Image: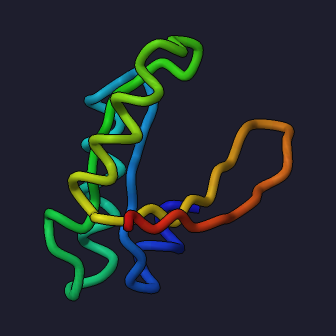
Amino acid sequence: MAYVVAANGGKLVLSARRKDALEAVKTRCLSSNANLSVKDVLVLPMDITDFDRHQQCFDTVLDHFGQVGICYLLPNLNCGTFTIKQD
């Protein structure tokens, strides 16, 4: 999914526990679209079960991009999208 979004010029936040794997995905995303810059793909390691960090991670994304458009994909679940704009 990340590769398709990147190939179409979308900005991304990549989150999972393993930073090395996220960096590899980021590299492949950037190579799929010459118009994307390093700042267009944010690597944000996190454990989704660490609920105490959710707000901190969300704030990091807002600080980086100024707004958030989210497409979440969880194994064996549906994909959904929504956008939050910072006022």
| Residue 46 falls in image quadrant | top left
| Residue 76 falls in image quadrant | top right
Quarter of the picture containing the C terminus is bottom left
Residue 17 shown left or right of residue 20 in the figure: right
Give the residue at x 42% y 80%: 7
Residue 70 shown left or right of residue 3 in the figure: right
Q: Position of residue 30 (x, y in %)?
A: 25, 68
Q: Position of residue 53 (x, y in %)?
A: 41, 19
Give the residue at x 39% y 63%: 86
Of 47 and 52, which appears nearest the observer? 52
| Residue 71 falls in image quadrant | bottom right
Q: Position of residue 56 (x, y in %)?
A: 34, 28
Give the residue at x 40% y 46%: 14
Give the residue at x 56% y 59%: 70
Quarter of the picture containing the N terminus is bottom right
Count the marks. 0
Residue 51 shown left or right of residue 28 in the figure: right
- Most distant residue in the front direction: 87
Q: Is 54 situated above or below 80? A: above
Q: Position of residue 13 (x, y in %)?
A: 38, 52
Q: Is 60 situated above or below 56? A: below
Of 8 and 67, which appears nearest the observer? 67
Residue 25 shown left or right of residue 52 in the figure: left
